[in-house]
Image: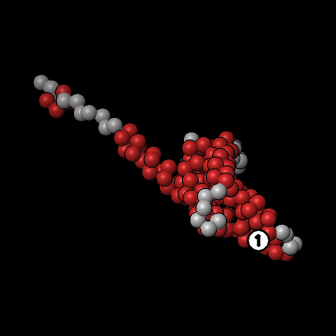
């Protein structure tokens, strides 16, 4: 007579719910990593451009252009770094990582303009999100070199 326990089939454990709940968590963690890298690069580029402007005596009109250039470069690095860590969904990860950085930069612009939102703030926000997404796309589509 066969044992009763051998006839009872146990349900296979499904690990997908844990993975599904882990995926948004990983997205947020990698977006925060990209945001922190982008913030560091933002201050590095702002400092470098400020030094260049003082050293070569640029006009005051070039300040918004230099700030925009440093913000776009920082957004590119933020999106690239976050998507490189996440390894998929480059556009979404790049935009999510750049979103807090755009809020910081928009706050700087609004404070510099005396509390008004101008066309420069809107342009900066849109361009930073686009460039952050581009950085994410570049990171996912870049091939890493493997050692033999």
Quarter holding the N terminus is top left
Left or right: 32, with 16 as reference point = right
**Residue 49 position in % (x across, y down):** 77, 67
Please give the residue where the numbered disc 1 appears in the rendered image: 50
Q: Is residue 118 visible?
A: yes
Query: Is disc 1 surrounded by few (<14), some (14 to 19) or many (20+) residues within 10 Å?
Result: some
**Residue 79 position in % (x across, y down):** 62, 51
Left or right: 30, with 15 as reference point = right
Residue closest to the eye, 67 or 110: 110
Residue extending furthest top?
A: 1
Left or right: 95, with 71 as reference point = left
Q: Relative to 71, does residue 15 appear above or below in the rendering?
A: above
| Residue drawn at point x = 67 percent, y = 64 percent | 42
Q: Secondary structure at mark 1?
A: helix
| Residue drawn at point x = 76 percent, y = 66 percent | 63
**Residue 96 position in % (x across, y down):** 55, 50
Q: Relative to 18, does residue 66 appear above or below in the rendering?
A: below
Residue closest to the eye, 1 or 148: 148
Q: Is residue 84 visible?
A: no
């Amino acid at each position: 007579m066969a044992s009763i326990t051998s006839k009872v089939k146990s349900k296979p454990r499904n690990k997908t719910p844990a993975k599904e709940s882990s995926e948004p968590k990983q997205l947020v963690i990698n977006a925060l990593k990209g945001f922190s890298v982008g913030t560091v690069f933002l201050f590095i580029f702002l400092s470098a451009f400020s030094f260049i402007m003082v050293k070569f005596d640029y006009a005051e009109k070039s300040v918004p252009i230099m700030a925009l250039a440093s913000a776009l470069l920082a957004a590119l690095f933020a999106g690239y770094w976050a998507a490189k860590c996440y390894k998929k969904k480059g556009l979404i990860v790049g935009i999510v990582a750049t979103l807090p950085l755009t809020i910081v930069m928009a706050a700087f612009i609004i404070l510099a303009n005396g509390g008004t939102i101008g066309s420069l703030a809107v342009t900066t926000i849109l361009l930073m999100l686009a460039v952050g997404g581009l950085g994410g796309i570049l990171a996912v589509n870049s091939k890493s070199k493997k050692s033999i």
